[in-house]
Image (tube, helix red, strand yellow):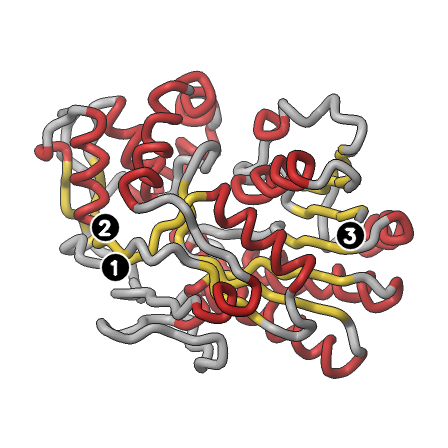
Amino acid sequence: MRILVTGAAGFIGSAYVRHVLREHPDDEVLGLDLLTYAGTMANLAEERDNPRFRFVHGDIADADLIARLAPDIDAIANFAAETHVDRSLLDPEAFARANVIGVMTLLDAARRHGLRMLQVSTDEVYGHVPEGEAAREDARLSPRSPYSAAKAGGELMCLAYGTSYGTDVVITRGANTIGPRQYPEKLVPLFVTNALLDLPLPVYGDGRQVRNWMHVDEHAEAIDLVLRRGRPGQAYNVGADNERENLDVAHAILERIGKPRSLIHHVEDRPGHDRRYGLDTALIRDELGWRPRRDWRQTLHDTVDWYVANLEWWRAIREHDHRFQEYYERQYGERLAGVGRG
């Protein structure tokens, strides 16, 4: 199979590229990425010289570019997206462009060339899920942030193309994903790198928000399985049943690194912050046989240990990329005003 992997230089996309090249020796991967703040060629350093991998710098919303690439591929795995909820509150228009218009451009290519397209989505499209409940794939979509609304819009566009044109589409809705090479704006890498720098960990509100945590390598494996074996028009929930409150995650990170809990600072919550996500993952387990292998402790420890061992990777972002610094000040400057180093 020849797979166009969009968002190939990002966190989950680069993990997927590595998975395909490692597990499918006859496959070829064409990576596409706009190389915005969250995508870096450093994530693909090990693959650059692989003869089965080729990289193109470009935008999924560039219809001419996608039209040129489409005749040489068999399938599209779309990881390209604006992904951070906090940023979506600051610039919702950018999320609509990438997560809806960009998706439609890929769907047009898939329709014209008879390609299968996998859309990587998120459990956040379900919105808040009450304690004791788990959203199934047929649950109502109820997004509550510009990010999740844009992802839901991209999903609905995929389903519409399947119904209207017979385009072969499948969708994955993944839980919170952690692991190596995640841009340090997200909760776990932000908390890990802040702790290593003896900076405060900004916990939104009371920190009792519940998330389901999954390792990026297992997420990539599940996505690959759905791309190859998923039913056309079907969405699949992907999660590892590792539910933890954000405050517990912060405690576990500090314990692993050996830093004091006094680094935790509760700050003003963000608007529309979903209290809990909960996924029913029976479909992908029963139909496709996928099972996560890492428990919560291994998932977190593997992640924390990678950031401890790869200081140069995240220091290059935190200390030398003005885009991260400007975002951090905009998001946390007032929230952490008056709070010093630990």
Sort mark 3 into few (<14), some (14-19) or many (20+) by Cα contacts within 10 Å.
few
User: Mark 1 near mark 2, Cβ–Cβ under 8 Å?
Assistant: yes
Q: Earlier in the sequence, mark 1 or mark 3?
A: 3
Q: Is residue 26 above or below residue 198?
A: below
Which mark is on residue 246?
2
Query: Toward the viewer: 169 or 80?
Result: 169
Query: Toward the viewer: 248 or 227?
Result: 227
Q: Is residue 59 above or below residue 129?
A: above
Which mark is on residue 51?
none
Sort mark 1 into few (<14), some (14-19) or many (20+) by Cα contacts within 10 Å.
many
Q: Position of residue 49 (x, y in %)?
A: 74, 22
The image quadrant of residue 169 is: bottom right
Q: Amino acid at mark 3?
A: Asp
Q: Is residue 169 left or right of residue 221?
A: right
Q: Amino acid at mark 2?
A: Asn
Between the residue at mark 2 and the residue at mark 3, the CA separation in whole angstroms equals 38 Å
In the image, what residue occupies the spot 28% across and 65% down? 276
Q: Earlier in the sequence, mark 1 or mark 2?
A: 1
Disc tally is: 3
Provide the residue designation for mark 3.
62
Provide the residue designation for mark 1.
210
In terms of secondary structure, where does tag 1 sit?
A: strand
Q: Nearer the viewer, mark 1 or mark 3?
A: 1
Query: Toward the viewer: 319 or 171?
Result: 171
Q: Nearer the viewer, mark 2 or mark 3?
A: 2
Q: Position of residue 268 (x, y in %)?
A: 19, 53
Q: Amino acid at mark 1?
A: Val
